[in-house]
Image: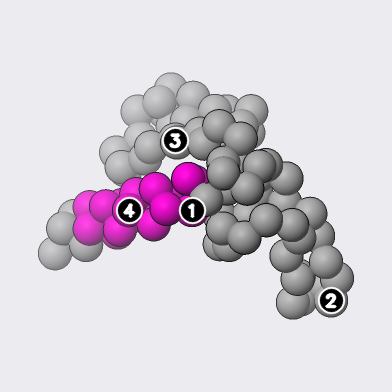
Amino acid sequence: KKYCLDIVDRLSKKDAQCFYKHINYEDAGHGLLSSRPGGLWHHRGGFWCLVGGTAEGNQNAHSDSVIEIMKFLSVLKNDCL
């Protein structure tokens, strides 16, 4: 969370002209690509890694982040046309 807030702070101070938004999901780990509990297989590293969070927090983050990503891509698409 700290690094995300640092990035948002820097963008704000530099008066960045790009769209950005920080969303923090309570009780979510780092595995937004998967809503399942437990670890994820790191295909490049060849090992299992724990992503943290709770099963409910990860599910909520996964569900909402799909919507937020689609909104973000829509903004980018509209800005690039």
Give the residue type that dot 4 points to.
Ile
Q: Name the mark nearer the viewer: 2 or 3.
A: 2
Which labelled disc corresponds to residue 17? none
Along the line of sight, the residue nearer the viewer: 39 or 8: 39
Q: Earlier in the sequence, mark 3 or mark 4?
A: 3
Can residue 8 be seen here? The reply is yes
Along the line of sight, the residue nearer the viewer: 81 or 60: 60
Q: Earlier in the sequence, mark 2 or mark 3?
A: 3
Which labelled disc corresponds to residue 22? 3
Tell me if 57 is positioned left or right of 30 in this view.
Answer: left
Which labelled disc corresponds to residue 46? 2
Q: How many marks?
A: 4
Q: Earlier in the sequence, mark 1 or mark 2?
A: 2
Residue 66 covered by magenta stretch: yes
Label 1 – label 2 distance at C-alpha: 23 Å
State the image coordinates of residue 68 (x, y, percent, origin top left).
Answer: 34, 49
Q: Earlier in the sequence, mark 1 or mark 3?
A: 3
Residue 38 against residue 1 in the figure, above or below: below
Q: Earlier in the sequence, mark 4 or mark 1?
A: 1
Q: Name the mark nearer the viewer: 2 or 4.
A: 4
Label 2 – label 3 distance at C-alpha: 30 Å
Tell me if 36 is positioned left or right of 42 in this view.
Answer: left
Give the residue type that dot 2 points to.
Gly
Label 4 – label 1 distance at C-alpha: 9 Å
Q: Earlier in the sequence, mark 2 or mark 4?
A: 2
Residue 67 against residue 12 in the figure, above or below: below
**Which residues are the magenta region?**
60-75
Q: Give the SS element for disc 4.
A: helix
| Crowd band around label 4 with a 10 angstrom C-alpha radius: few (<14), some (14–19), many (20+) | few
Q: Which residue is mark 4?
A: 67
Q: Give the SS element for disc 3.
A: loop
Q: Which residue is mark 1?
A: 62
